[in-house]
């Protein structure tokens, strides 16, 4: 008779494994706004640098959103590490693979991927057509040329850092802790989903109502899918992080390509 491989606990990833006495409500709920604020902050900082060193005008900072996001990601990763430490947890202790469940997880992940393609693509393109009249106008606001060396930095560091910051923050840290604090599962899913979509309105922060609306609309369905999937099966977190990095590598490559002088279309 073969013995099953013992599985590490879902420490910190589910409400049942979190010590409520170690939670600070202001910290948990305040973290919902963190990335939104940091995106705006770092874009303003980059804009100021461009003006001071006469490398461009303030609004050019919108094109540097890969760097804005990377800096935000680094701050968020450090913040998550600190908050988990307060609870007696370590970052990689929370987000890890579960060897005995790999086959089941991969099958479930395949089903999620089949669904996520249309969920991510359709709101993006159809939303742009509805709001702007065509998808190209929206994409050209997002993907703009920047100095080539900056684009290379973005290509290397943006996908890696966002994988360890974004989904872990909203669904690894915030979601289960809101569930503990409120005892309301629907709210614990809805708030991270909403703010995950909302944060993209400031990445980049372009003061155009159509662009802001498009950025929110294009991410909301996908954010909801992620929220539901990671609620049902939180141990999929590391797989989702890897897929996230791959998807954002493709986006960063578009910025690099345009910065090399290649046409977007």
Image (cartoon, rainbow, N blue to C red):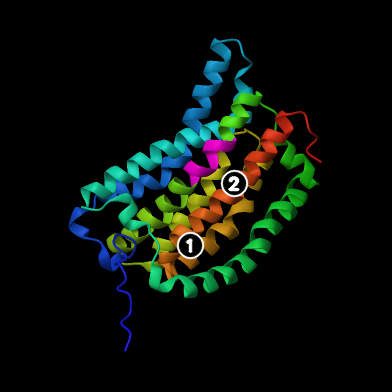
Name which residue lies at 31% across and 56% down: 93
Residue 51 rendering spot, x and y as whole percentages: 57, 13
* Label 1 secondary element: helix
Viewer-proximal residue among 247 and 181: 247
How far across and how far down the image is residue 27, in percent?
29, 46
Q: Name the mark on residue 227.
A: 1
Q: Relative to the observer, which residue lies in front, 42 or 117?
A: 117
Q: Is residue 11 visible?
A: yes
Q: Which residue is mark 2?
A: 248
**In which quadrant of the rendered image does the N terminus lie?**
bottom left
Question: Cα distance, mark 1 to mark 2?
Answer: 19 Å
Residue nearest the viewer, comparing 171 with 33: 171
Chain part drawn in magenta: 155-162
Q: Which residue shows up at 59% across the image and 46% down it? A: 248
- Left or right of 112? Residue 193 is left
Whether residue 204 is visible here, answered yes or no, is no
């Amino acid at each position: 008779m073969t013995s099953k491989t013992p599985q590490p606990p879902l420490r910190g990833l589910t409400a049942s494994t979190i010590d409520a006495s170690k939670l600070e409500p202001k910290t948990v709920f305040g973290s919902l706004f963190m990335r939104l604020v940091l995106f705006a902050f770092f874009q303003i900082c980059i804009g100021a640098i461009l003006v001071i060193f006469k490398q461009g005008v303030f609004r050019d900072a919108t094109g540097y959103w890969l760097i804005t996001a990377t800096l935000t990601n680094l701050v968020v990763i450090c913040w998550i590490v600190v908050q988990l430490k307060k609870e007696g947890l370590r970052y990689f202790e929370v987000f890890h693979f579960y060897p005995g469940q790999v086959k089941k997880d991969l099958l479930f992940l395949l089903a999620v991927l089949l669904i996520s393609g249309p969920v991510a693509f359709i709101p993006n393109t159809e939303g742009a057509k509805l709001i702007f009249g065509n998808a190209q106008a929206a994409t050209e606001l997002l993907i703009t040329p920047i100095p080539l060396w900056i684009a290379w930095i973005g290509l290397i560091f943006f996908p890696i850092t966002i994988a360890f910051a974004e989904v872990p923050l909203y669904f690894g840290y915030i979601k289960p802790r809101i569930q503990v604090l409120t005892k309301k599962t629907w709210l614990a899913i809805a708030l991270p989903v909403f703010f995950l979509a909302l944060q993209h309105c400031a990445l980049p922060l372009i003061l155009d109502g159509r662009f802001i609306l498009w950025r929110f609309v294009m991410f909301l369905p996908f954010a909801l899918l992620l929220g539901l999937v990671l609620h049902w099966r939180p141990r999929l977190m590391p797989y989702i992080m890897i897929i996230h990095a791959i998807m954002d590598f493709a986006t960063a490559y578009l910025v690099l390509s345009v910065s090399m002088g290649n046409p977007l279309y």
